[in-house]
Image (cartoon, rainbow, N blue to C red):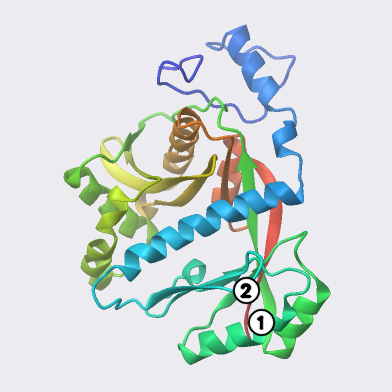
Amino acid sequence: MVSESAADGKLIFAARLDERQTYPGFSQRTMGLVRARMTTSPKLVPSLGLIERILAAENAYTLSRLQVLERIPGNPIGAACRRVDDGVVAFIARHLPSPSLNSVRGLGDGHAHHIAPLVEWYRANGVAGRFEMVPGHYAAALGRELARLGYFHSGFHAGLVGEPDVPTAMPPGVEVERVAGDAAMEKYLDAYVAGWGFPASEHARFKQNVRPWLHQPGWSLYLGRIDGREAGAATLYVHDKVGYLADAATDPALRGRGAHLALLGRRIADAGAAGVELVCSGAEFLSTSHRNMERAGMRLAFVRSIWTPL
């Protein structure tokens, strides 16, 4: 069943619409909302301020994840955060090979002298840390210093942004629920480890480590189902009027059936209900996730460069 607004709890989706064409089941009001949304909002006009709001939400989420790991007795993951200068932050999880949890963000012009100590910090901890550079902050001296220390520009990562009032449709056969309780949390964790391809030998430890996600301030967890079967998991994190759409993953056996897009739509709608001004997320450039975010009404805000050891 297709509805014409998000107000009644059901959502519609439109990607690229021909203004001259009519769409059965969609009222003129609905089409007006969608077409209005397809124009550039002043909030989404690219600016350094917009980039910094996105980065602040990302960093707050990553720090929150690390704090969950750090609170495990004895800190067996080796989670830590090092704040350097003017928004420069370095994250580390020594025994968890997650690129986002072992990265440096926020370096800008005048920060090249911080790179060598950070490289040494990662090396001393046995971690191949990565450095993330964003347009508006990057300066040539940063790249030269990273190259001198044995790093190279190894990839790109897209940062996307949108407004939380985008009508979105649930693909047929897909349902999304917000996780509320221990039983649903176990289903979420099952979908999460399947989507991210965790080895079976790591499932129990991972689940034990992250069950506190359910009660983290600012977090909302979501479980996607296809024909009643757990298909995907995702997170919404709200920080300073920005909704960060994090960690979505779909079971490989159920990909291509709309679970990721449905998880995006539900989180965007809930972010709007929570009063955020913007939603943002990240994805590998031109990946399926990137394309789905564009289909859900988000747009490219910037492309960061990723620097890793040779």
Q: Is residue 98 above or below residue 277?
A: below
Q: Is residue 88 left or right of residue 1?
A: right
Q: Is residue 247 left or right of residue 22?
A: left
Contact flag, marks 2 and 1 (Cβ < 8 Å): yes
Please tell me whether residue 52 is drawn above or below residue 155 in the rendered image.
above
What residue is at 31 percent from the left and 39 percent from the top?
225
The type of residue carrying mark 2 is Phe
Residue 115 circle label: 1
Give neighbour class at mark 1: few <14, some 14-19, many 20+ (Cα, 10 Å). some
x, y (%) of residue 2? 45, 17
Position above or below: 302 against 32 = below
Regarding mark 1 in the picture, which secondary structure is present there? Answer: helix
Residue hosting label 2? 131
**Residue 50 bears which disc, if any?**
none
| Residue 218 visible, this angle | yes
Q: Residues within 10 Å of mark 2 (few under 14, many from 20)?
A: many
Whichever of labels 2 and 1 marks the residue nearer the N terminus, that label is 1
Tell me the kind of residue under disc 1.
Ile
Q: Nearer the viewer, residue 27 or 237?
A: 237
Farthest left residue in view: 183
Quadrant of the snapshot with the N terminus? top left
Q: Which corner quadrant holds the C terminus?
A: bottom right
* Image position, residue 233 (x, y; %): 36, 48
